[in-house]
Amino acid sequence: KDIPLSRSSEDSMLRREGEMQRDQYSGRALGDAQGLRSVKEHEVSSFLFYTPIKGIIVNFFDPLSNHYGIDIVTQRNEPVKAVYDGHVVFSDWTLETGYVIGIAHSGDLISVYKHNSSLLRRQGQFVRAGDPIAIVGNSGELTSGPHLHFELWYNGQPVNPQDYISF
């Protein structure tokens, strides 16, 4: 609550790298290449999401304060799961948000999972909804305890995950 959240140069670099990786994989027709149903309606509400983790939401989506996701507190060592089928476009450490994994999905959707204690998937790997991709943690400078910071981006814009997923 007391930590001022603002977009740092590292966060901006992470987002740019994620966008470049997304573009690299989006040319493959993600859904069709894996025999999956492509999203015909280009709306987030057309997706059927898997819950990444069960827990208590302690910090809500608030783009006006640069908080582009939600923070979910749960028990240590809980597996974080992919919300939808896609390709891992980022799987690495950042100073502010620790171990981060980003997944590009069909329909110009990206999901981002931050503050993990470890990552279970590498960049370029395909994951299915519900696959474990990370372990909940407390990594990075912008954390105050074990939790998952989860973001959804649609057409390059952050959207409120609570509008589409039951936590």
Image (cartoon, rainbow, N blue to C red):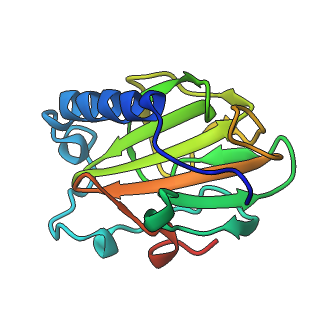
Q: Position of residue 149 (x, y in %)?
A: 62, 51
Q: Quadrant of the C terminus?
A: bottom right
Question: What residue sits 19% from the left and 45% below the top?
Answer: 32
126 left or right, relative to 29:
right
Residue 116 placement, left or right of 69: right
Left or right placement of residue 46 versus residue 92 in this view = left
72 relative to 105, above or below: below
Q: Quadrant of residue 48?
A: bottom left
At 24% from the left edge and 47% from the top edge, which residue is drawn?
31
Direction from residue 44 to residue 54 in the image, left or right: right
Q: Is residue 5 visible?
A: yes
Name which quarter of the figure residue 153 lies in: bottom left
19 to 80, vertically: above or below? above
Q: Residue at x 74, y 56 (%)?
A: 2
Q: State which quarter of the image contains the N terminus.
A: bottom right
**Residue 49 seen from this side:** no
Across and down, in percent, residue 88 comes to 42, 32
Task: Tally the numbered discs.
Answer: 0
Q: Nearer the viewer, residue 162 or 33?
A: 162
Residue 70 spot, x, y in % from top left: 59, 62
